[in-house]
Image (spheres, rainbow, N blue to C red):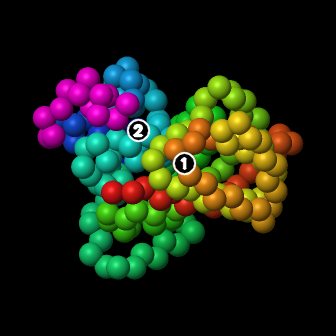
Amino acid sequence: MIKEEEVGKKIREFRLNAGLTLNQLAEKTGISQGYVSKIENSQNAPPVSTLLTLARALNVSMSEIFGEDENKKPISLVKKNERPFVAKNGSIFGYSYQALAHKIHNKHLNPYILTIPANQKRETDFHFEHKGEEMLFVLKGKMKFLYGDEEFILGKGDCVFFDSSIPHNGFSCDNKKVECLIVIYTPE
């Protein structure tokens, strides 16, 4: 497992191995060339959805981006103290993600523990949007979940399942930390 700040170097390595320029990767992913450059130079730790988009475009897995050896077993046990942080405080909202199945290679379901900080920025003009589906289950706290033009208040035990190609994001409702189980499905 590589450190968070080394993820960008790994992405650059895969891009160069694929013979792609920054501009070609940007066009292939729909991510701006400047943002890809910032990611590669570890100036910006992207959210998981952006990493998934880059991995697909580079024809690699998330496990490969994080420098993990391919697991040939069809099962993965990740103990609580073995959960690596992915984009720790790296997204525009300060979200952090802990990977729950990082030992499995070439999977379509990507489960994480998502932590939304207590006093994060509330930039409602920025949303996540990517191919696939997501399930978000609130473990702790209360959040406002924005989905397209709709708003939902979710509390402990609430679950939302949705088409992740619709713009979405979420914020703490009461300036307290929110923890969620999030599972992101990415089609081939």
Q: Main secondary structure of the magenta part?
A: helix
Please give the range of residues in magenta: 17-30
Amino acid found under the numbered disc labelled 2: Glu
Position of the N terminus by quadrant: bottom left
- 1 or 38, nearer to the observer: 38
List x then y, in percent, for residue 93. Answer: 63, 35
According to the picture, the residue beneath numbered tag 2 turns out to be: 5
Q: Residues within 10 Å of mark 1 (few under 14, many from 20)?
A: many
Q: Residue at 27% across / 75% down in the picture? A: 72
Q: Going by the picture, which residue comes out furthest to the bottom?
A: 74
Left or right of 123? Residue 108 is left
Amino acid found under the numbered disc labelled 1: Ser
Q: Going by the picture, which residue comes out furthest to the front?
A: 149
Asked whether 19 falls inside the magenta stretch, the response is: yes
List x then y, in percent, for residue 186. Answer: 42, 55
Position of the C terminus by quadrant: bottom left
State whether residue 51 is above or below residue 140: above
Residue 136 marker = none
Asked whether 31 falls inside the magenta stretch, the response is: no
Q: Which of the 4 quarters of the picture holds residue 128?
A: top right
Left or right of 91? Residue 16 is left
Spatial CA distance of label 1 from label 2 is: 27 Å
Q: Is residue 39 visible?
A: yes
- 86 or 124, nearer to the observer: 124
Q: Is residue 169 visible?
A: no
- 182 or 29, nearer to the observer: 29
Residue 164 marker = 1
N-terminal of the two: label 1 or label 2?
2
List x then y, in percent, for residue 100. Answer: 51, 64
Q: Secondary structure at mark 1?
A: loop
Q: Closer to the observer: label 1 or label 2?
A: 1
Q: Residue at 59% across / 46% down in the picture? A: 96
